[in-house]
Image (cartoon, grey):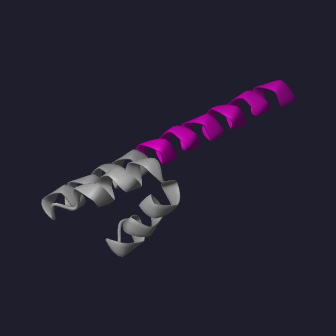
Amino acid sequence: MCDVLDKVENRGIAKGKIEDEMEGKAQVTTLMKKLFEQNRIDDAKKASEDAAYCDRLLKEFGIN
């Protein structure tokens, strides 16, 4: 019985990880769109290379 519950729990965890990854991609896509609309090409490039900078820009644009 514990094996079945473990499998169900693991599926839920895996599903949550996939959903989080999809949400993260959507946030970065939105950020890139906004940066390109404002012609902030250098910021887009730096955000693609530096996770901390990307996080800072996400906060700047209120994307969460």
Decide if residue 12 is on the left or right side of residue 26.
right
Q: Is residue 17 above or below residue 38?
A: above
| Rendered-image quadrant of the N terminus | top right
> Does the magenta run of residues contain 11?
yes
Give the dominant element type of the magenta stretch: helix, strand or loop.
Answer: helix
Q: Position of residue 33 (x, y in %)?
A: 21, 54
Based on the displayed image, in which of its 4 quarters is residue 17 positioned? top right
> Does the magenta run of residues contain 10?
yes
Question: Residue extending furthest front?
Answer: 42
Decide if residue 18 is on the left or right side of residue 31.
right
Q: Is residue 3 above or below residue 37?
A: above
- Range covered by the magenta-colored residues: 1-22
Q: Is residue 1 visible?
A: no
Decide if residue 50 is on the left or right side of residue 38.
right
**Residue drawn at x 23%, y 55% as measured from the top left:** 41
Question: Residue extending furthest right?
Answer: 2
